[in-house]
Structures are given as C-alpha cells and as structure tokens.
C-alpha cells in the first residue's frame, strides 16, 4: 500500500489522498474539487479508481463526486448520518458558502466498526462525530485519515449544524484509546501523528 497526497485543493485548501494497492487499485479519501486534476493523478500512477471514502459530507469534501463517479464508475461510501448532505446544498454548506453543488445519488452508507476492503487494503471505520454528526476516521495499518476531526495543532470546527465541541473531544478520545501511535492524514493542512497531537495540541487539554 502506498499513499499519495493531493494537498490544499480549491478555495478551502482541502486535502485528498490516493491509496494505491498492490494490484494497482486506487481508493480516494474525499473528493474535494478539481476532478480532472484528481483523475490525472490517478491515471499518471497507472491506477484504477475503485472506491471513494468520504470522511464527512461538507461541500469542500464532495464537490468532485459526480464527475469522478461518471468517469470511473467507482463506489462511494459515507456514514449514514451524513448521507443527506449529498442531496442538500444547505446541509452540505454549499448554500452557506455559495460554492457549486450537484446532488449525488447512490452512495453506500457506513457505520461505526464497518470495514471497507479493496485488494489487500482494509479500512476500519471509526465514527467520530463532532464536526458533523456523521464524521468518520478511516484506520488502515499505522495510518488514520482523520478528515476534519483532528488536525495538526487543531481540531475541526464545531460551530456548523451537527457540530459539538464536547462530542468531538470524546471522538478524539476514541482515537487515543486505540492504544498506539498513528500517522494522521487530515482533511486540511499538514500531516501529523496521533501521540504528538495528544501531547501538544492546545484543544486537547481535557485528554491529558
């Protein structure tokens, strides 16, 4: 398994990640925007996009969905609590920010403890509400794709509908309780590691 990071896409500076399997399949973590750029990256790596795993349903993580699925026929997964965001520009915050929005139909739903497997790559779903009700982290090997739950030196915003500060801290406590260190690849900004954040992140004092 190899991870390729596409950094700071679009006006929101959203990251997405291409996970490459040994059989040259690609799993995309989030689909923020610039579908041509994402597809070009996948094709240049000689990969076939099989699955998109969404960390949550905000507009800056889903804008490229329709174009990517139309081009590749890949499957899309999202937590069941956020699936309504794929069909509602206000729930997705696209209406709030005035960004492009096209409804997406056909996503498959996830819940806590589910796994998604492509070739040798098995992603465990950990429900981490707080940024949205259906925010999730995907854990594979020594990596956590944290979406907008946990960032370098910060955490996800909790002032949007479905957000709650106490809930997101409880969600990050679940990551702490995994009992080992992980590389953390977030939805924005630089990557980090879990123990560093638990020790130094100013928003996580309650967990120390």
Image (spheres, helix red, strand yellow):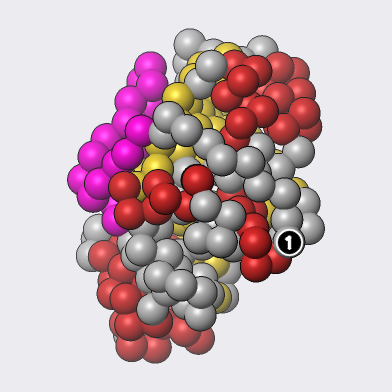
Q: What residue sits 39% from the left and 82% below the top?
A: 165
Residue 112 vs residue 121: left or right?
Answer: left
Q: Nearer the viewer, residue 182 or 43?
A: 43
Q: Quadrant of residue 40?
A: top right
Whole-percent x, y for residue 138 in the image: 38, 46
Which residue is nearer to you in this view: 1 or 117?
A: 117
Q: Residues within 10 Å of mark 1 (few under 14, many from 20)?
A: few
Quarter occupied by the C terminus: bottom left
Q: Is residue 96 above or below residue 60?
A: below
Instruction: Report the number of discs.
Output: 1
Residue with the mark numbered 1:
98
Left or right: where 153 falls relative to 109: right
- Which residue: 53% across, 36% down? 104
Q: Is residue 112 magenta?
A: yes
Residue 143, magenta (yes or no): no
Residue 3 visible? The answer is no
Q: Residue drawn 36% across and 33% down?
A: 108
Q: Which residues are magenta?
A: 108-127
From the top left corner, tell me how far across and down residue 166 is, in percent.
33, 82
Residue 124: quadrant of the picture: top left
Examine the residues drawn in magenta and state their main secondary structure: strand
Residue 68, image x and y in percent? 63, 27
Residue 98 appears in view: yes
């Amino acid at each position: 398994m190899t991870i390729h990071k596409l950094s700071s896409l679009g006006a929101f500076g959203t990251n997405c990640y291409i996970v490459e399997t040994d059989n040259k399949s690609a799993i995309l973590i989030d689909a923020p925007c610039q579908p041509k750029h994402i597809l070009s990256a996948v094709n240049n790596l000689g990969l076939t996009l099989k699955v998109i795993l969404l960390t949550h349903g905000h507009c800056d993580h889903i804008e490229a969905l329709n174009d990517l699925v139309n081009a590749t026929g890949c499957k899309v997964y999202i937590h069941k609590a956020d699936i309504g965001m794929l069909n509602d520009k206000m729930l997705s915050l696209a209406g709030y920010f005035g960004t492009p929005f096209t409804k997406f139909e056909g996503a498959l739903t996830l819940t806590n403890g589910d796994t998604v497997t492509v070739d040798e790559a098995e992603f465990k779903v950990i429900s981490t509400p707080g940024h949205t009700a259906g925010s999730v982290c995907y854990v594979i090997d020594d990596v956590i794709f944290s979406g907008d739950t946990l960032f370098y030196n910060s955490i996800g915003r909790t002032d949007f509908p479905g957000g709650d500060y106490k809930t997101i801290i409880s969600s990050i406590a679940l990551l702490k309780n995994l009992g080992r260190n992980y590389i953390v690849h977030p939805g924005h900004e630089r990557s980090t590691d879990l123990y560093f954040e638990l020790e130094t992140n100013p928003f996580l004092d309650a967990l120390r």
